[in-house]
Image (cartoon, rainbow, N blue to C red):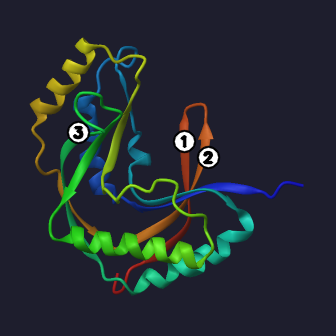
Amino acid sequence: MAEETVRTFVALQLPAELRAEIEQLLNLLRRDRSRDPVRWVAPANLHLTLRFIGDTALASIAAISTQLQSLATHSPFSLDVGGIGYFPNEQKPQVVWLGLHSEGLAELHRLQQGVDAALERAGAAPAVDTRPFSPHITLGLVDARKVQERELTMLHQRVKALAVEEVASWLVSDLSLMHSTSTPSGPLYSTLQTVYLAGS
C-alpha cells in the first residue's frame, strides 16, 4: 500500500495589510481575463516561498515541524516590498514577480538557510530547485499559449506605467509550513504549522 503524502512548502505568509496593497497593484495589472496572458495569483494565495518540499509523507510531518520550530530563535526583521520583474527575463517571461529589498534581506537569507538545514535534519528530500535562493513574491504566471508580441508589449507597458519602487514595508515575525491542494480553480493553501520568531 502506497504511503499517504501531502504536497508541502515552507513560506512567509503576508500580513493582511500587505495583501491589500498588492491586491490594488494586481487590479491595475490585470486586463480582460479571456485575453490576459498572465494567470494572476489570488490575493489569498500571495506568499514568499522559502523552500518547496513537494510530496511529503504524512509520517514525516511531525519531524519536519519539530525541526522548523528550532527556527523560533531567529529575530523578526523588516523587508521593503517593491519593484516588478520577470523570470527568467523580460523577453521570455514565465513569472511576474514583486521584489524585496532593504537590509533585512541578509536576515531573510539566513532564515532560508536555517529552513534548509532544518529540513535536512528532518530527513526531507533534497531541494528540487538547486538554483540560489532568489526571494520574491509571485504575482502571476505567464501562459505561453497566449503570449504574442502584442500581448507581451501591453504587459510591459502596464508594468512600466506603474513604476512601482515600493509597495510597503513588512515586519517578518513568523514562518509557516504549508499544505498545497490542487483544485480546478487553482491551488488551495492551508497552514500546517506556524513558527513565531523570537519576541514576536
- Write down the quadrant of residue 146 in the picture: top left
How crowded is the residue under tag 2: few (<14 C-alpha within 10 Å), some, or many (20+)? Answer: few
Q: Nearer the viewer, residue 92 or 78?
A: 92
The disc, 2 or 3, on the residue closer to the chain's N-terminal end is 3
- Write down the quadrant of residue 135 in the picture: bottom left
Residue at figure coordinates x 41%, y 39% from the top left? 42
Looking at the rendered structure, the secondary structure element under dot 2 is strand
58 horizontally vs 148: left or right: right
Q: Position of residue 64 (x, y in %)?
A: 60, 73
Residue at the spot of label 1: 187
Which of the image's four quarters has the C terminus?
bottom left
Q: Nearer the viewer, residue 80 or 129?
A: 129
Which of the image's four quarters has the N terminus?
bottom right
C-alpha gap between disc 2 and disc 1 = 6 Å
Query: Against 195, is 185 above or below?
Result: above
Residue at figure coordinates x 23%, y 27% from the top left? 91
The reply to whether residue 172 is visible in this rendering is: no
Q: Nearer the viewer, residue 191 or 92?
A: 92
How crowded is the residue under tag 1: few (<14 C-alpha within 10 Å), some, or many (20+)? Answer: few
Asked whether the beta carbons under mark 2 and mark 1 sit within 8 Å of each other, the answer is: yes
Q: Position of residue 107 (x, y in %)?
A: 27, 74
Q: Which amino acid lies under the numbered mark 2 shown in the image of this protein? A: Thr
The reply to whether residue 17 is visible in this rendering is: yes
How crowded is the residue under tag 3: few (<14 C-alpha within 10 Å), some, or many (20+)? Answer: some
Query: Against 116, is 183 above or below?
Result: above
Q: Which amino acid lies under the numbered mark 3 shown in the image of this protein? A: Leu
Query: Against 76, is 58 above or below?
Result: above
Q: Which amino acid lies under the numbered mark 1 shown in the image of this protein? A: Pro
Q: Position of residue 83 (x, y in %)?
A: 16, 46
Residue at the spot of label 3: 25
Residue at the spot of label 2: 181
